[in-house]
């Protein structure tokens, strides 16, 4: 949901961060500065974006947990609160990070309570969006963004934004799966299998499983460093 909104704003001509890349459109620089307590970097980036852009956006789902701090540092913030059913939110974490479904549903509820507490007390302009309705009412959603934030978007940008919104985009799913890995079989004989495996998202050792006729035959932790592969 957040990526659909941030990507729509991007296609409507809104700057969503120097380090924001498709398909996620998340400015890693500003996110890291906030979450690592680098207040000087936060202030510097905000001043930079304010000086370079009349309107700019920033997307970070975890920002729910520090909205009050964000509100105190931005000069004229407008908020977009995105709502999606808690099962979908939790199941996405199961797919991408292999986390516990029920724990993630419980966490989603807690975060929604935090978000609603802020949304009901803030005096700032805010838009409430249904992630499901975005998919069925693309044009209405895009027009609401343009009018709500007074964007000077062209008809081409409107069409691009509408075309960007799709159900389960393949590129997004591929980029956000935490379990994606790479590897290679260097040697395969009757007595030995040798090779390497590595996660594309983290540096923790992976467990490699070997199957024979769909039955687990053996497993081993790929935790021996290979200097030659550096």
Image (spheres, helix red, strand yellow):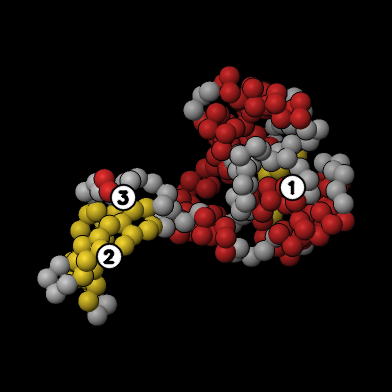
Q: Is the residue under label 1 in contact with that under label 3 (CB below 8 Å)?
A: no
Taking the spot 57% from the left edge, 21% from the top edge, the residue there is 39
| 42 sits to left or right of 152 | left
Q: Is the residue under label 1 in contact with that under label 2 (CB below 8 Å)?
A: no
Residue 33 is situated, as x and y percent measured from the top left of the image, at 55, 28
User: Which residue position holds label 1?
Assistant: 9
Q: Which mark is residue 185?
A: 2
Residue 130 is situated, as x and y percent measured from the top left of the image, at 69, 54
Furthest toward the front, the residue is 228
Q: Which of marks 2 and 1 is nearer the N terminus?
A: 1
Calculate the distance from the C-alpha at mark 2 to the C-alpha at mark 1. 44 Å
In the image, 12 versus 168, the foreground residue is: 12
In the image, 61 versus 12, the foreground residue is: 12
Could you tell me if residue 140 is visible in this image? no
Could you tell me if residue 91 is visible in this image? yes
Taking the spot 71% from the left edge, 59% from the top edge, the residue there is 164
Q: Element type at marker 2?
A: strand
| Depicted 40 relative to depicted 110: above or below | above
User: Which residue position holds label 3?
Assistant: 229
Calculate the distance from the C-alpha at mark 3 to the C-alpha at mark 1. 40 Å
**Res 65 quadrant in image:** top right
In the image, 144 versus 192, the foreground residue is: 192
Residue 102 is situated, as x and y percent measured from the top left of the image, at 43, 54
| Depicted 117 relative to depicted 144: above or below | above
Residue 138 is situated, as x and y percent measured from the top left of the image, at 77, 60
Q: Which of marks 3 and 1 is nearer the N terminus?
A: 1
| Depicted 199 relative to depicted 124: above or below | below
Other-residue count near label 2 (Cα within 10 Å), few / some / many at <14 / 14–19 / ≥20: few
Number of the front mark, 2 or 3? 3
């Amino acid at each position: 949901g957040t990526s659909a909104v941030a990507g729509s704003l991007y296609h409507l001509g809104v700057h969503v961060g120097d380090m924001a890349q498709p398909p996620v459109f998340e400015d890693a620089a500003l996110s890291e500065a906030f979450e690592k307590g680098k207040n000087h970097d936060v202030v510097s980036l905000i001043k930079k974006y304010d000086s370079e852009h009349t309107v700019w956006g920033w997307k970070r789902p975890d920002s729910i947990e520090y909205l009050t701090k964000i509100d105190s540092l931005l000069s004229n913030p407008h908020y977009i609160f995105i709502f999606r059913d808690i099962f979908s939110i939790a199941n996405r974490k199961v797919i991408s990070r292999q986390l516990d479904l029920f724990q993630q549903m419980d966490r989603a509820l807690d975060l929604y309570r935090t978000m609603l507490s802020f949304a009901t007390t803030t005096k700032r302009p805010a838009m409430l969006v249904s992630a499901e309705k975005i998919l069925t009412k693309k044009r209405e959603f895009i027009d609401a963004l343009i009018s709500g934030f007074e964007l000077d978007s062209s008809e081409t940008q409107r069409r691009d934004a509408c075309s960007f919104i799709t159900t389960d985009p393949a590129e997004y799913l591929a980029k956000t799966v935490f379990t994606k890995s790479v590897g290679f079989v260097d040697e395969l004989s009757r007595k030995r299998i040798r090779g390497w495996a590595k996660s594309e998202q983290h540096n923790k050792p992976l467990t490699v499983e070997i199957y024979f006729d769909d039955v687990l035959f053996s497993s081993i932790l790929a935790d021996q460093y290979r200097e030659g592969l550096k």
